[in-house]
Every structure is written in structure tokens, then in C-alpha cells.
Image (cartoon, grey):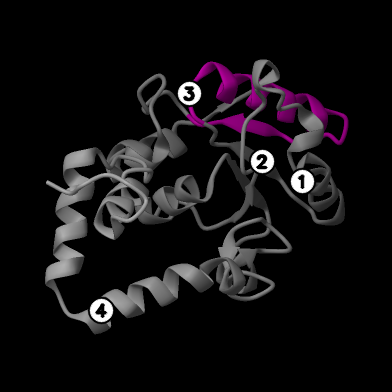
Amino acid sequence: MALEGPSDPLGELVQLLGRLPGIGERTATRLAYHVLAGDAAYAGALGESLSHIHARIRRCEVCGNFSAEAVCPICRDPRRSDDQICVVARVPDLAAIERSGTFRGRYHVLHGLLAPLDGVGPEDLPLDALEARVKAHSVEEVIVATPLSVEGEATALYVAEVLREHGTPVSRIASGVPHGGELEYTDQVTLGRALEGRRRL
């Protein structure tokens, strides 16, 4: 077992890996030993990639997706429909919907949810940008695909209220996704059915 302390680089690596979501101490320890036992070039490449990831990846200027370019590939794709915008809380949710293969419109990533108890209000989310996009384009429908949690529902209702004055129909994904479930971990069939069975707010 790795020793603990500031002079223990293996223990430090285990601690850092353990901060990743879904990675416990045992898994972090196994990953650390795997990196240590493997090729030094791989460990160097991994460290190099991690150290520059924030400089190389930015938020798309249009939708907020993570991208190496100012505008992400989805927003640049002329085959995507401008009629629909799907609002998601996080980029992994966008990726999950893309894997379902059922949505060919555009996205808008909030990078969070309304959570007054945690100090997250409407001004902390890019809702003004969403409103501007709806005004600038002939958007026929905004689909709110936030998690089916208290915060997700509150965010969905607020988005519907903001866009109602523009006459833009706002839909909510159907409850095929388990209550409190994260879209990132929902299987493709369930997520596809949830999108197809969305309802008007």
C-alpha cells in the first residue's frame, strides 16, 4: 500500500485520481500502479495532455460545448437543423444524447442548474445567450433535457418562463429517464425514447 505524506509521489497520484467522479481509493490505487508499471512515455504523454487540457479546450462561443475551436463541430455542421435547440445541464449530457442518435438539432449547455440553496441563480447560467439565440433564429422548439431532479425541474420551468414571452414552444424530455438519474449514465434506448416522448411545458 502507498505511503501517505508530502514526499510520497505515488500516494499523491492516488489522492489526485481519487478526486475523479466514480473513482474510489481502490480504483485510484489500481490506476496509479498501472501507470507506474507501464511505459514511462505513456505516463509522460498522459501528464502532458492533462497539464495542457485547459489551454487546448474551450467552451464553444455558440452553444457552450467543449471544443478545441472557437465554434464546436456540432454548431459548424450544416446538416444539423436550426429549428430545434436542446438545453442540457452539462457537456456529458450532450454527449449522451448524441450517442442516442435521435436528435439532429442544436444544443445549449448551461454548465449547471438553478440551485438557490447553493447560491446558483439565473444570472449564473447562460440563459441570456439562449434567449438571444432564440430571437436571432427561427427556432420552432426548445427541448429542455435537464436531469429529472428538483434542480433540473426548477431550471426547466424557468427556461419555459423566459422563452414563453417570445412565443417559442418549450418541451421537456419524457420521464423515461429515472427520477434523479443522470443523463450521462442512461442507456441509449431509454434516452432516445425520452426525447421522442417529450411533452410541452
Sequence-wise, the earlier of marks 4 and 3 is 4
Is mark 2 in CB contact (under 8 Å) with mark 1?
yes
Q: Which residue is mark 1?
A: 130
Q: Nearer the viewer, residue 199 or 42?
A: 42
Q: Which residue is mark 2?
A: 142
Q: Nearer the viewer, residue 56 or 149?
A: 56
Disc 2 residue type?
Answer: Val
Residue 166 shown in magenta: yes
Residue 119 shown in magenta: no
Q: CA distance from mark 1 to mark 3?
A: 21 Å
The image shows residue 183, relative to residue 28, as above or below, that is: above
Q: How many other residues sit within 10 Å of disc 3, few (<14), some (14-19) or many (≥20)?
A: many
Residues in magenta, as a range? 147-173
Q: How many other residues sit within 10 Å of disc 1, few (<14), some (14-19) or many (≥20)?
A: many
Q: Which residue is mark 4?
A: 42
The image shows residue 192, relative to residue 35, as above or below, that is: above
Expressed as whole percent of the image width and height from the top left, the position of residue 95 reads 44, 54
Q: How many other residues sit within 10 Å of disc 2, few (<14), some (14-19) or many (≥20)?
A: many
Disc 3 residue type?
Answer: Leu
Q: CA distance from mark 2 to mark 4?
A: 43 Å
Asked which secondary structure carries label 4, the reply is helix
Q: CA distance from mark 2 to mark 3?
A: 17 Å
